[in-house]
Image (cartoon, grey):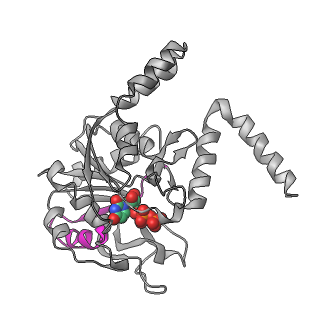
Amino acid sequence: MTARSSVRKAVIPAAGLGTRFLPATKAVPKEMLPIVDVPTIQLVIDEAVRAGVTDVIVVNGRNKHAIEDHFDHAYELEHTLRERGNARAADEMAAISTLVRLISVRQKQPLGLGHAVLCAREAVGDEPFAVLLGDDLIDNDADPGIGQLIRVHAETGAAAIAIMEVPAGKEHMYGIVAGDRDAGGRMRIREMVEKPKPGTAPSRWAIVGRYVLPPEIWPHLANTPPGAGGEIQLTDALRELAVSPAGMVGVVVAGARHDAGDKLGYLRANLAYALKRPELRDAVLALCREILAGQGV
Ligand code: UTP
C-alpha cells in the first residue's frame, strides 16, 4: 500500500557506535544486522516507502559504505546471479536499489541522536519530515507505523511521536513523556525527560523510534547543549517543540514493536519475523522445540 503523503522525506540516523552489539558492530553498522536475511534498515526503509516517503536521508558514521553499498546497484552480483539462472534473486537485488531515493550524510562524531538528526538539516530543508530509528522495528503490513504518525500530523498540524507504556522500573532506559490523554488514546505532551533517574519518571510512557517533525525543530536542535550521557539528545529539542504553539501529540502506534538494537530484542525480532515466513515457520518451531528439549526445558 503506498499512500500519497504530506511527508516526503525521512531521516534515518545510523551513526551510533552500537556498543551493545560489539564485536558484530566493529566494522558493520548495527542497522545492517539482518532480521532473518534482510538488514534491519531495509525493513525500516520499506516501512517509510509504504507510508509514501520518497526520499530517505541516512545519517552515516564511520562504517558508511556498508549501508550505501547495500542500496546501490550491484551489477556484478546481479550479472552472476542471472548467469547462474537465479533471475529471481537478481531481480530482488535490483529492486533494493530502486526502493527509494537515498541521500547519505555524515555525522563525523557520534555526539548523540539529536546531533545526528541535525546533520540532515540541509538535505531535509524547510518541510515536515519523518525520523525512523534504524534499529527500531514496527511490524504492521497493513498500516505502516510511520504512516499512522503522518496521518496524525496532517490532521492536527502538531509534531507526532510514537509512544508505548513500559513496565514500572524500566523508565530510566527510555525518553519518557507525560501529558493529557484523550478518549482516542492520543496524548497532548506537556513534559519530556530523557532517561530519568530511577523513581523520578513523570509517567511510564516511553518514546519509540518514530517521529514526524515540523521544520521548527531545527533551531531547537541547533541550540540543544549536551544532556544525558554527554550526548546532544533529540528529546531535549523535542521538549522545546512540545511547549510551542504547534505542540506535540504522542500516539500509540498499532503494530508489533521490536527493539533490534538490544540483544534480546534482536533475537525476539528474528524469531517473530521467521515465524511470519510460511517457508520457515514449521521448521523454526521444530528447531525451538528441539533446542528446548536439548536444554531439558
Ligand atoms: P542508540 O543509543 O540506540 O545507538 O541510538 P548506539 O549509541 O549506536 O547504541 P549502543 O547503546 O552504543 O549499543 C539510537 C539511534 O541513533 C543513532 C544510532 O545509530 C541508533 O539508530 N545514533 C546515535 C546516531 O546516529 N548518532 C549518535 O551520535 C547516536
> From the viewer's perspective, is residue 23 above or below residue 172?
above
Residue 87 in the figure: left or right of residue 214: right
Residue 82 in the figure: left or right of residue 3: right
Q: Position of residue 278 (x, y in %)?
A: 64, 31
Residue 235 placement: quadrant: bottom left
**Residue 182 visible to the viewer:** no
Picture residue at 81% right of the left edge, 47% below the top: 289
Residue furthest to the left: 126
Frontmost residue, 91 versus 19: 19
Frontmost residue, 25 versus 201: 25
Picture residue at 68% right of the left edge, 36% below the top: 281
**Residue 120 visible to the viewer:** yes
Picture residue at 30% right of the left edge, 71% below the top: 233
Q: Which residues are magenta?
A: 233-255
Residue 56 placement: quadrant: top left
> From the viewer's perspective, is residue 242 above or below residue 257?
below
Q: Position of residue 282 (x, y in %)?
A: 73, 35
Ligand 1 visible in quadrant? bottom left
Name the quarter where the N terminus is drawn.
top left
Q: Position of residue 30 (x, y in %)?
A: 47, 54
Frontmost residue, 129 versus 168: 129
Picture residue at 21% right of the left edge, 42% below the top: 6
Residue 89 in the figure: left or right of residue 145: right
**Number of numbered markers:** 0
Residue 282 in the figure: left or right of residue 44: right
